């Protein structure tokens, strides 16, 4: 705890390797929304060959092409699985987007048929049907937590949730996990997986604060997130709703 407020330890996984569609904006959003409330964000960047040395309150990983995912999978499963899984089991939070989400499920069968091993945070698996099958691309609107979250998606893989998985949201517009069952993303404890790029957090301030609160639950459970002027964020949210043909 610093003089003004708690410290939030963010482990940013593979920022250069897994950063499709400006997903790094999620870390910037978290950093700013913490700092505006007197929370001190401490960012630990994990590059490809690194091993995590510190525990984290929040893990963030963005999207990536199949090749980058194969590289990230090696670093995750051979050097960092124990640290990440033990922190998550202890209540740490996670935001895993698209390719990063796929790597936090059991496995990803890539477009070329190769198997990419995941960490099994989510009871799910992803199958890419092959590059001849149209990708899931477009604006997405979902019902989440009695509100809506918005973003856009661009993935070939279709994610299927297992019996122990909980979907993050229900699709209102777009494809979501697999364009078949109406689910989007997954939740396991305080870990969230989603296909929403955008980046997703700046235009969904309620989701960003939900994640920050979850990440603080161990170190500062009583800390209240004060209100922010989110007029620009909600304007962007409404713009995304319009882009998806909704009000
Ligand atoms: N390569 C994965 C797929 O095509 C993930 C893509 C992404 O992260 N946008 O499904």
Image (cartoon, rainbow, N blue to C red):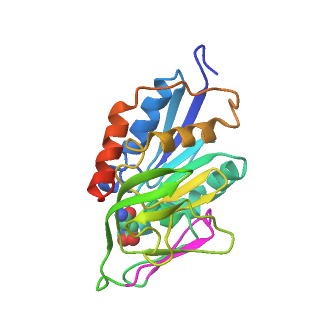
Residue 201 visible in rendering:
yes
Residue 140: % across, % down = 37, 60
Picture residue at 57% right of the left edge, 32% below the top: 8
Picture residue at 30% right of the left edge, 80% below the top: 134
**Does 95 appear above or below 228?**
below
Query: Could you say which is closer to the camera, residue 27 or residue 239?
Result: 239
**Does 29 appear above or below 124?**
above
On whether residue 98 falls in the magenta region, the answer is no
Pick the quarter of the image with the N terminus: top right
Name the outermost residue toward the front.
247
Residue 175: % across, % down = 40, 70
Image quadrant of residue 105?
bottom right
The span shown in magenta is 114-129
Residue 157: % across, % down = 41, 75
Q: In this image, 5 relative to 29: left or right?
A: right
Picture residue at 36% right of the left edge, 31% below the top: 231
């Amino acid at each position: 705890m610093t003089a003004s407020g708690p410290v939030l330890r963010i482990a940013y996984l593979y920022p250069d390797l897994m950063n499709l569609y400006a997903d790094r904006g999620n870390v910037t959003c978290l950093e700013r929304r913490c700092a505006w409330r007197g929370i001190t964000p401490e960012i630990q960047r994990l590059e490809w060959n690194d091993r995590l040395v510190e525990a984290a309150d929040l893990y963030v990983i963005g999207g990536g092409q199949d090749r980058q995912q194969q590289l990230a999978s090696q670093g995750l499963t051979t050097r960092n699985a124990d640290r990440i899984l033990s922190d998550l089991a202890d209540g740490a939070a996670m935001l895993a987007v698209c390719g990063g989400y796929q790597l936090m499920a059991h496995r990803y069968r890539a477009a070329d048929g190769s198997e990419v091993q995941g960490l099994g945070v989510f009871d799910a698996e992803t199958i890419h049907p092959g590059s001849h099958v149209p990708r899931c691309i477009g604006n997405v609107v979902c019902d989440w937590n009695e509100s809506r979250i918005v973003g856009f998606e661009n993935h070939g893989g279709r994610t299927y949730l297992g019996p122990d998985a909980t979907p993050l949201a229900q699709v209102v517009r777009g494809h979501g996990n697999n364009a078949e069952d109406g689910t989007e993303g997954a939740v396991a404890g305080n870990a969230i997986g989603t296909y929403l790029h955008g980046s997703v957090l700046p235009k969904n301030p309620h989701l960003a604060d939900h994640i920050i609160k979850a990440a603080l639950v161990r170190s500062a459970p009583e800390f209240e997130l004060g209100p922010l002027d989110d007029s620009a964020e909600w304007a962007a949210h409404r713009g995304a709703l319009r882009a998806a043909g909704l009000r």
